[in-house]
Image (cartoon, rainbow, N blue to C red):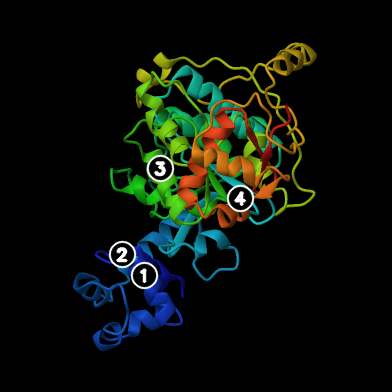
Amino acid sequence: MLLHWIWLAHRPGLSDRGKASLLQHFSDPEDIFYADEDAFSQVENLSPTGRESLGDKDLTMAQEILEQCREKKIGILTFQDAAYPRRLRNIPDPPVVLYYKGSIPDLESRPAVGVVGTRKASAYGLTTAKRMGYQIARCGGIVVSGMAYGIDGMAMAGALTAGQPVVGVLGCGADVVYPLANRSLFRDVEAYGCLLSEFPPGQPPAKWTFPKRNRIISGLSNGVLVIEAPERSGALITARQAAEQGRDVFAVPGNIDLPSFQGSNQLLRDGAIMVSSGWDVVSEYEALYPGKLHRYTQGILQSAYPDEVENAGESEPERVAQTVRKPETKLGLKKKLDKKAIDKAAPTPYSGVKPNLPPLSADEETIVRALSDGERLVDDVIAETGMSTGKLLSALTMLELKGVICRLPGKRIGLRSR
């Protein structure tokens, strides 16, 4: 019964892992509702506080939430519903209930990419976020992000500009617009995708709600892209949770002199996949979604200035859904990009090490030797070299920065031709 699902989802003092353990032990929330204390003693991940909370059999709050959802036309998905996202169901601490406005896209038909970053973004970060969101969508991916000001909102706006559905994951109720400056963006996301939350209608945002939200962003996604993040950032929490959930972590290299890029640049040192276009991200999943993805690397131009973010307030006008200005001459833009060798098709790997390679460390030389016979799967290189995953990924990032290797679709790598 839906009331029992809502009752379980909002038991105070009960962790998300505890709720997952209860659902594994009992057939459904109705059985949990009628179970006694002795039955709960056999369930893992239940604290004394959690067991005490389960003793409260009052359904009044659940009934109020259900009525609010009906009045505000908010949909409800339970953990056992067929439409509940499969990837999210498989994380260790999935939400028991999801509330949503709009239509949930088919997250199994195309790759979903979580795009995250700081609220106080630079002009470069804002421009890159919108371009990456646009390109990911044009290439066939689904952008998943928070609805915060800054990187999250700009990525969502870019994806909507491409005319593709998006998923906005909220740290508040699905009916709460936060920040208010993003009001028009909320309307667009609801109209062309969905606003998703594990929090009941009317729940205001708080410091503790956003870390909980972040695990849903990564849980829904095949991989998470960090565009701009300082050392202490919610985006880094999302990246860490993505790694723990077995998701890919991507990062855009940023200005080493700006504190707002220190966290995202550190991710590259730790083994995140370096990307410079939406296709770099989406192409990692070509083998999983044959025929669904296509290369697209052209950008969109927009105005984005740091002072717009620094001065953002709740009463300020809506500026995230900015007017898009397309390049006047696509051919001229393409020529400029070709000169810089940006977003070209991956070159054919070569056999043998060329004499003009930059100086390499011992680990990097080991990887180059392993790739000398042609492109390889990353897992195969790990098995052959005996290097730890973290150590190898860090070395791969340095080799990519030095222009020695290139990443290929299907999690393959190869040496660049010279």
Position of 179 with respect to 226 (left or right) is left
Q: Position of residue 205 (x, y in %)?
A: 33, 43
**Residue identified by numbered label 2:** 15
Residue found at x 32% / y 71%: 59
Q: Type of residue at label 4?
A: Val
Q: Position of residue 332 (x, y in %)?
A: 76, 11
Query: Who is closer to the viewer here, 322 or 139?
Result: 139
- Mark 4 or 2: in front is 4
Query: Who is closer to the viewer here, 311 or 235?
Result: 235
Q: CA distance from mark 3 to mark 4?
A: 43 Å
Q: Residue furthest front?
A: 355
Q: Type of residue at label 1?
A: Lys
Contact, mark 2 vs mark 1 (Cβ under 8 Å): yes
Residue 28 lies, with reference to residue 19, above or below; the image says below
User: Callout 2: helix, strand or loop?
Assistant: loop
**Residue identified by numbered label 3:** 176
Q: Which mark is residue 19?
A: 1
Q: CA distance from mark 1 to mark 4?
A: 36 Å
Q: Which mark is residue 378?
A: 4
Position of 7 with respect to 130 (left or right) is left
User: Callout 1: helix, strand or loop?
Assistant: helix
Query: Who is closer to the viewer here, 303 or 243?
Result: 243
Contact, mark 3 vs mark 2 (Cβ under 8 Å): no
Position of 23 with respect to 374 (left or right) is left
